[in-house]
Image (spheres, rainbow, N blue to C red):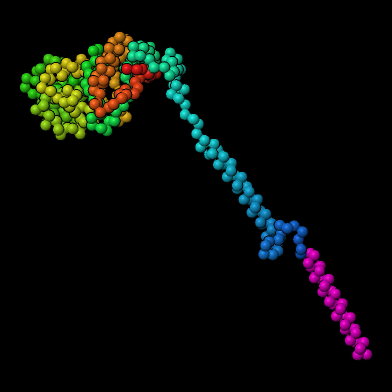
Amino acid sequence: MAEAKKSDKKVQKAVKDDAKEEIVETVEVEVTPEDPKTTAKAGKRSAKATREAEEKEVKEERKKATSDKKTAPQKAKTQKKPPRSRLERAGKKYREVSKQIEAGKTYNLVEAVDLATKTSTAKFDATVELHINLAVDPKQADQNVRDIVALPHGTGKSSKIAVFAEGDDIDKAKVAGADIVGGDDFLAALDKEQIEFDILISTPNLMPQLGKYAKLLGPKGLMPNPKSGTITTDVAKAVKEAKGGRVEFRVDQAGIIHLGIGKASFGPQKLLENAQAVVTSIRAAKPASVKGVYVKSAYVTTTMGPSVKTEL
């Protein structure tokens, strides 16, 4: 009997063990996913965690696509187009008259002045300008080219002349044609910053009185200077020269001289004579330290008109 009970217990235990194995196998089969995305490196994921991960991935892709669309037009804007030439940006009339000037050709001064007047597109009486690039260094004191030249036919511009003088010089300046002449009354006008003149001429003995107005007159280029002939004892002669077309030229920081030589209405002959007077003066002012080529390039042009390359 005892042996029978023991055998029954062994059978029951074996049945229980088999049942446990079946349960474990069943659980393993139910939980094990077929999709590799549902498992993480650290172990298994729940269905909720998998769903949230997928939703997050979709949001990231959507956000990336939106940012790409926004940056696409910005990238297109950053691509700069090559700049257009002045001729391409100019008006129809300018482009039409520019056809008369052969590209790359250097004209002599007679032809350049004639072409400049013919190609003037302005509705008003345009100024004819001469631009000369010199092989000088303006930072060097001896290469700062500067001079005064009297144009044979004037500039075509009426300048208002003021003379600061006293005694007999006041009467002489008035006879010569000065527009404003005075002494203490002139200084009183400067105290009020009233500047109604284009050129100021003074006698040497009165210059100390103008010293305190240097900050007012200097930036405007109106301070009298012996190099420009505006400080002189002969005020009558200075006034006549200023009225008659005396101009001052000076190189800028790039070593270029810009000067108006008359109006388009003067005609080619008068403009040519004015230009020749300027060229002669520039050649005479050549610094001794400059060797070789002195004039690098020169152009004749009008206000709002195309430029014509010329040789001097």
Q: Is residue 303 visible?
A: no
Q: Is residue 309 visible?
A: yes
Could you say where residue 272 lies in the image, as x and y percent from the top left? Answer: 30, 12
Residue 282 image-quadrant placement = top left
- Residue plotted at (80% across, 70% down): 24
Quadrant in which the N terminus appears: bottom right
Is 115 in the magenta? no
Q: Does residue 72 appear left or right of residue 309 in this picture?
A: right
Q: Is residue 50 above or below residue 1?
A: above
Quadrant in which the C terminus appears: top left
Q: Looking at the image, how many numbered discs can be counted on the residues?
A: 0
Could you say where residue 290 lies in the image, as x and y percent from the top left? Answer: 27, 27
Residue 205 image-quadrant placement = top left
Residue most extreme to the bottom: 2
Q: For this rendering, which residue is in front, 127 or 57?
A: 127
- Residue plotted at (34% across, 23% down): 296
- Residue plotted at (24% across, 26% down): 287
Q: For this rendering, which residue is in front, 164 or 146?
A: 146
Could you say where residue 300 lies in the image, as x and y percent from the top left? Answer: 34, 18
Residue most extreme to the front: 292
Q: Which residues are magenta?
A: 1-30
